[in-house]
Image (cartoon, rainbow, N blue to C red):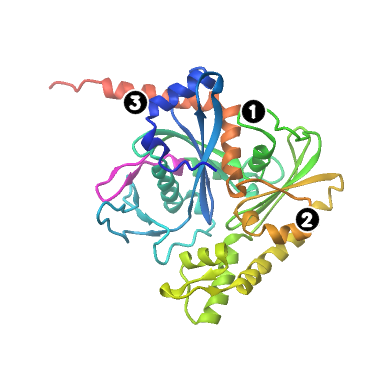
């Protein structure tokens, strides 16, 4: 995976847009289009770039990710060029410090998380990492399936509009309140379904080699707080859906309990990440301690009920041919999942699948609509800038 962190700090926006329009979009692109899978445990971003020129030019998606760790108020100070990572809403001055090192971070697992300043601050931290502070951007995000849908059919328009309104709020960065990225378009896509799109379609909108569009497949998306299951039928029809409130944050909850019991000390989020990734922890700079048993217990405690629900869910579709796994939980718990479903297809960089899927959906199917909104905004902004002040 090529990292998108700092991409627009070294690539001027005008150069980026000109190159993409010349080689692919034929002048349609007016500003960067960025997707952010704004999850409960981590945020994943995806950006389409072009590498090379002329006959050697190829489209490529680059990515970045951050843990969803933030705390209300100001909790860090910049020293010797360091970043404060403070984000606030212009209209209310409500502020959050976003950092993987912040102590006692907010719990993202609230019913209204997708429409909060906490959510908005995490997204803007991601946009800032990409180098988009002060720049116009078309932003794409998502929602778990049962939040995105309203019953069996249609979309949850009330929640979608609330989330869009939240994403369009102006945000500042740092104690000097410098402008963050200006979100001029906000689009929202269904998670899990987006991951299936990423599996099936390449950056050019073509079916990937070896993918059969005429089979029934199940998308298994294990995220931070939720697990989405989606049956996708031939013709891109949604056959069934289900969202469970199980995910990576629940693994961390269990692991925290187990480590506290063994070591009589509460681990912070950084130590929990270390334990999950390496199965070892080093307390206060001491010798590493093996915690393989505790990590296995925590993963099994969450995965067993998820797998039981998957078994029940897929029984309705005996013609099912493929299970496609993605999301941070699949990346973390792949071995246990493969024990149950040996033929599961786990996507490369599984935790970035939804972000890549949002981006592909937008650029391949919705670009005209997105750029129409952007064009209207740019025209209105230009008129305001060109208006001369009245002389009394």
In the picture, measured across the screen, residue 192 lies left or right of residue 313, that is left
Q: Looking at the picture, how far across and down is residue 354, in whole percent?
A: 60, 44
Q: Which mark is residue 341?
A: 2
Residue appearing at x 57%, y 32% in the figure: 362
Q: Which mark is residue 381?
A: 3
48 shown above or below 88: above
Residue appearing at x 60%, y 28% in the figure: 364
Category of crowding for the residue at label 1, using alpha-carbon neighbours closer than 10 angstroms: few (below 14), some (14–19), many (at least 20)? some
206 shown above or below 182: above
Cα separation between marks 1 and 2: 29 Å
- Residue that carries the numbered disc 1 in the rendered image: 205
Residue appearing at x 29%, y 24% in the figure: 384
Residue 171 covered by magenta stretch: yes
Q: Are marks 3 and 2 in contact (CB under 8 Å)?
A: no
Q: Looking at the picture, how far across and down is residue 312, in whole percent?
A: 80, 57
Category of crowding for the residue at label 3, using alpha-carbon neighbours closer than 10 angstroms: few (below 14), some (14–19), many (at least 20)? few
Residue 145 covered by magenta stretch: no
In this orientation, which residue lies closer to the viewer: 220 or 153?
220
In this orientation, which residue lies closer to the viewer: 347 or 329?
347
Q: Looking at the picture, how far across and down is residue 236, in whole percent?
A: 73, 35
In the picture, measured across the screen, residue 114 lies left or right of residue 130, that is right
Could you tell which of marks 1 and 2 lies nearer the N-terminus?
Answer: 1
Mark 2, secondary structure of its residue: loop
Category of crowding for the residue at label 2, using alpha-carbon neighbours closer than 10 angstroms: few (below 14), some (14–19), many (at least 20)? few
- The quarter holding residue 356 reads top right
Cα separation between marks 3 and 2: 53 Å
Q: Looking at the picture, how far across and down is residue 388, in whole percent?
A: 21, 20
Residue appearing at x 57%, y 71% in the figure: 255
Q: Which residues are magenta?
A: 165-181
Could you tell which of marks 3 and 1 lies nearer the N-terminus?
Answer: 1
Q: Quadrant of the C terminus?
A: top left
């Amino acid at each position: 995976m090529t990292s998108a962190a700092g991409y627009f700090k070294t690539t001027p926006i005008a150069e980026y847009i000109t190159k993409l329009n010349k080689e692919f979009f034929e002048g349609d692109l007016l500003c960067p289009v960025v997707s952010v899978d704004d999850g409960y445990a981590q945020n994943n971003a995806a950006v389409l770039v072009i590498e090379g020129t002329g006959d050697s030019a190829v489209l490529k998606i680059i990515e970045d990710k951050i843990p969803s760790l933030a705390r209300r108020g100001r909790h860090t100070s910049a020293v010797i060029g360091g970043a404060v990572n403070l984000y606030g809403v212009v209209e209310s001055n409500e502020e959050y410090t976003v950092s993987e090192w912040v102590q006692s971070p907010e719990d993202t697992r609230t019913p209204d998380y997708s429409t909060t300043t906490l959510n908005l601050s995490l997204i803007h931290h991601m946009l800032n990492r990409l180098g988009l502070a002060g720049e116009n951007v078309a932003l794409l995000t998502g929602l778990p399936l049962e939040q995105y849908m309203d019953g069996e059919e249609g979309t949850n328009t009330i929640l979608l509009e609330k989330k869009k309104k939240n994403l369009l709020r102006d945000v500042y960065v740092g104690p000097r309140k410098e402008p963050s990225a200006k979100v001029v378009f906000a689009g929202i896509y269904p998670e899990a379904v987006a991951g299936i799109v990423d599996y099936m379609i390449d950056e050019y909108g073509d079916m990937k080699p070896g993918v059969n569009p005429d089979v029934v497949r199940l998308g298994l998306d294990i995220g931070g707080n939720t697990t989405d299951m989606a049956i996708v039928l031939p013709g891109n029809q949604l056959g069934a859906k289900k969202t469970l409130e199980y995910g990576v944050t629940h693994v961390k909850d269990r692991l925290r309990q187990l480590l506290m019991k063994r070591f009589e000390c509460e681990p912070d989020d950084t130590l929990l990440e270390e334990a999950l990734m390496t199965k070892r922890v080093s307390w206060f700079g001491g010798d590493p301690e093996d915690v393989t048993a505790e990590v296995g217990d925590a993963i099994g405690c969450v995965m067993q009920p998820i797998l039981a629900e998957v078994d029940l869910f897929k029984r309705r579709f005996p013609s099912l041919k493929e299970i496609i796994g993605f999301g941070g939980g699949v990346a973390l718990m792949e071995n246990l999942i493969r024990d149950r479903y040996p033929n599961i297809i786990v996507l490369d960089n599984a935790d970035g699948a939804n972000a890549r899927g949002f981006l592909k959906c937008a650029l391949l199917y919705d670009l005209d609509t997105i750029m129409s909104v952007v064009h209207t905004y740019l025209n209105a902004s230009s008129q305001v800038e060109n208006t001369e002040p009245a002389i009394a």
